[in-house]
Image (cartoon, rainbow, N blue to C red):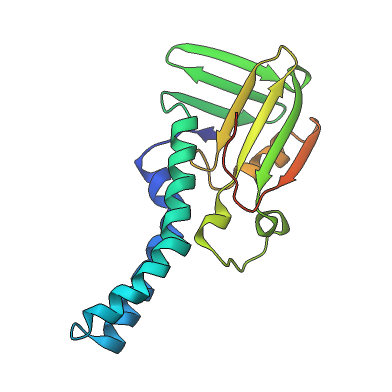
Amino acid sequence: MKLKINFFSHIKSIKNLIILSVIYLSFLFYIFGLSDIETIVYLVLPFIFIFVLPVLVIHLNYFLSSTTRMSYNIDINSLVVIDGQDKTIYKVTDIATIYIYATPNRFKDSATRSFPFEDYHYAKIKCKNGQEITLTSLHSQNLDKQILDCLSDVPIEKVFRLFPLVTK
């Protein structure tokens, strides 16, 4: 599986927020129309603080902690890091541990989501040579499942986070 951050991966990541926003704003305009703008503003502000702001913070955090010039290939028993013309291959024997950070709903594979940011997750791959590779859900929406399928021989630890921000 080739993993790379591009315009479409950004859109896929915020898809749930876009759908929720369109439904919520359509509902508000249907109920109140344009006649009661003050009420709409009072109802939109909590929506922004509860739903939009957390997604923007996590999305920006993931974008800033990922290198867009690099792409990755996760194959059975190997991870290939492609930086321009350079390729570095990490076999399963070269990887010490993989930490997957996600919300509890993501790990439960629950179909219901309370917040749009619950689909965000990331993985830290610690190599035996001391190098650390961070892959985020901007690379792939099913990053956790791809890692579990292809790199299953590596020790994988699932770390629960209610707000999964990438930390150094």
**The one of 94 and 41 positioned closer to us in this rendering:** 41
Residue 33: % across, % down: 22, 85
98 lies above or below 165:
above
In the image, residue 125 above or below residue 47: above
Percent x, y of residue 9: 42, 44
Q: Quadrant of residue 1?
A: top right
Q: Residue at x 66, y 43 (%)?
A: 101
Extreme residue in the bottom direction: 31
Is 78 situated above or below 159? above
Residue depicted at x 55% and y 49% = 120
* Of the pair 39 and 58, the residue shown nearer to us: 39
Above or below for 52 versus 88:
below
In the shown orientation, is residue 129 left or right of residue 73?
A: right
Compared across the picture, whether 122 is left or right of 153 comes to left
At horizontal 38% and vertical 62% (from top left) the residue drawn is 18
Tell me the residue at 65%/31% (across/down): 124
